[in-house]
């Protein structure tokens, strides 16, 4: 009877060691999976950050182009206005040489 209990306790000890080893293996596997998931999440956050930065840069560039187009339009309008005013002044001088005038309304 004494030998049987010794074998049972030895078997229980061996079984306990196996279970402990299985638990340790599972824990290690879960830790590896967790680290992979965390790394993937971190990389995904990095991608999102760069995507947001790229979109922000595109919005800024688009706004700069709109401002540039607006300022270019204003510069062209001013140049056209000056050119038309110079032509008008030239026309007035030519008419005054021949004794004619352009009607100007008094203000």
Image: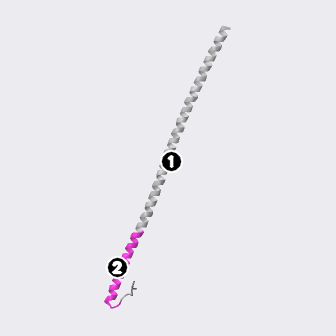
Q: Which residue is farthest left?
A: 97
Q: Is residue 101 left or right of residue 25?
A: left
Residue that sits furthest to the right in the current view: 1
Q: How is the image coloured?
A: one colour
Label 1: how many residues lie within 10 Å, few (<14), some (14-19) or many (20+)?
Answer: few
Range covered by the magenta-colored residues: 73-100
Q: Residue at x 49, y 51 (%)?
A: 52
Residue 20 image offset from top left, x and y in percent: 59, 23
Is residue 91 inside the magenta stretch?
Answer: yes
Reply above or below: 14 against 40: above
Q: Residue at x 50, y 43 (%)?
A: 43
In this rendering, would 56 be left or right of 12? Answer: left
Local packing at callout 2 (Cα closer than 10 Å; few below 14, some 14-19, many 20+) is few
- In the image, is residue 22 above or below residue 58? above
Mark 2 element type: helix
Residue 7 on image: x %, y %: 64, 12
The residue furthest top is 2
Q: Are marks 2 and 1 in contact (CB under 8 Å)?
A: no
Q: Which residue is mark 1?
A: 48
Badge 2 is on which residue? 86
């Amino acid at each position: 009877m004494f030998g049987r209990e010794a074998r049972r306790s030895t078997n229980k000890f061996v079984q306990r060691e196996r279970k402990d080893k299985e638990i340790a293996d599972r824990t290690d596997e879960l830790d590896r999976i967790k680290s992979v998931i965390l790394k993937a999440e971190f990389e995904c956050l990095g991608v999102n950050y760069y995507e947001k930065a790229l979109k922000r840069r595109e919005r800024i560039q688009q706004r700069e182009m709109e401002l540039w187009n607006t300022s270019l339009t204003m510069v062209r309008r001013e140049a056209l206005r000056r050119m038309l005013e110079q032509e008008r002044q030239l026309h007035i001088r030519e008419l005054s040489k021949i004794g004619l005038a352009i009607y100007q309304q008094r203000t």
